[in-house]
Amino acid sequence: MGFSIILKKLFFFFIILQLCTIPTFSAFHVISSENIFAPFQTVSSAPYEYHTYDSMTLLLNNLSQAHPDIMRLTSIGTTYEGRDIWMVKLSENVTRDDDEPSVLFMGAHHGDEKPSFEVLIFFINYIIDTYQMNSIDDDGDEYSDESPECKRVRDILNTTQIYIIPMVNPDGVEYGWRKNREPNYGANGQSTNITSYGVDLNRNYGYMWNIVYLFPENYFLEYLLNDQSWIYRGEAPFSEKETQAVKRFIENHDISISLSYHDYGEFMIFPWMHTSRHTPHESLYRSIGANMSNINNYELKIYGQYGEREYIIPRYQGTPGSSENWLYGEHGILAFTMELCRRRPERNPSLVLDACEKHVEVNLYICERAQTIEQEKHMKESKISKGLFFDRALFHNFLNV
Ligand SMILES: [Zn+2]
């Protein structure tokens, strides 16, 4: 037992050493050897021009005013610095909340992941432009000469409510960093002075919030609880205005499936994210993930459950507090993380546009698949487990390391 404790300490020491010796660690969204040791690449082409918060706001205002029949723009809340968190709804009869399947796309939980909102702005433009081509068809023949692409978009708008929050964290986007901009007064609010700024919003959602205390090494507790860290998770679940806004929205809408865009790495993950256990919807997740992977060629990260081997420690080093875990765990919404692009920040215009185009197809697929998701959820899977606190795999690991 003494030897195994030493091994455990050595493992922890090694992890911490890794984090400390890689100065840019905190900028990474995920912690993995492939990302940490990715070779530096130089990009010679001109920088891609990303939208700013203001240019996006202007664009969305103009589009919603020009297309009030299919696009509605609302604010779901404001940030610490007072910016509106914009929500775009796309659907026919857009002002009415229908009983149609609803999908949610989110971008920029992390402000320095610009491709994550760019793909959604591109998608909004694509839907509007393609739908608009239909209205050119005014010869009275009821769309008989419309293209398959136009018909597809019209069918989706007729049957689906598409909700898009392109920038969950506009303050972070404007400041050019990962976290939001709320001042911290010590990690627990214990200081009278400002000690740092910002919370990692994708660690602030309130699902399995306390599990990190049980397995501090697996969850990088030291970083989650340090207000100076890039993955500081905040004083409490939903302590931040941005996550509160998303929470309010989710509680008032019936969403079936969700994609949250991040970068980078060109892969997809899905719950659980606090454990290597599978959810009761593992096969459904794999099915949707495999279809998305066929479109974008990204890797669908599959993790083994206890007994299957692969990963015993929490999925992807464990990201408790992620939006996906909460969306699924609390609301039964099938939720994926999509990590765009090979490197971050991606400034090669052709690569960013390539990601935008590929993910139009991914988003359309999600809208179409949403039509059957609720039936599929109930077909062969049992009710959603809450993800046991005393996770067998984790407990096993804890006892044996
Ligand atoms: Zn991210």
Image (tube, rainbow, N blue to C red):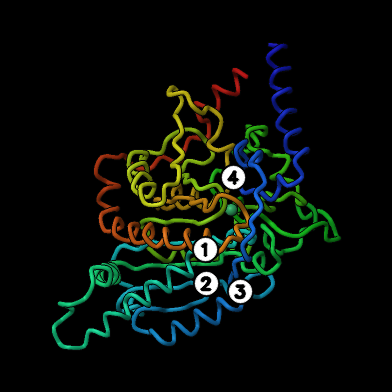
- Quarter that holds the N terminus: top right
Name which residue lies at 22% across and 84% down: 137
Q: Amino acid at mark 4?
A: Trp
Residues marked 3 and 2 touching at CB (< 8 Å): no
Q: Earlier in the sequence, mark 1 or mark 4?
A: 4
* Whole-number angstrom distance, CA of label 1 to CA of label 2: 7 Å
* Whole-number angstrom distance, CA of label 2 to CA of label 4: 24 Å
Name which residue lies at 36% across and 59% down: 361
In this rendering, position of residue 148 left or right of residue 347 = left
- Front of the two marks 3 and 2: 3
Q: Quadrant of residue 158?
A: bottom left
Name the one closer to the observer, 180 or 22: 22
What residue did someone put label 1 on?
Answer: 246
| Residue 359 visible in the picture | yes
Q: For mark 1, does the 10 Å Cα neighbourhood hold few (<14), some (14 to 19), or many (20 or more) residues? A: many
Q: Under tag 2, what secondary structure? A: strand
- Front of the two marks 1 and 4: 1
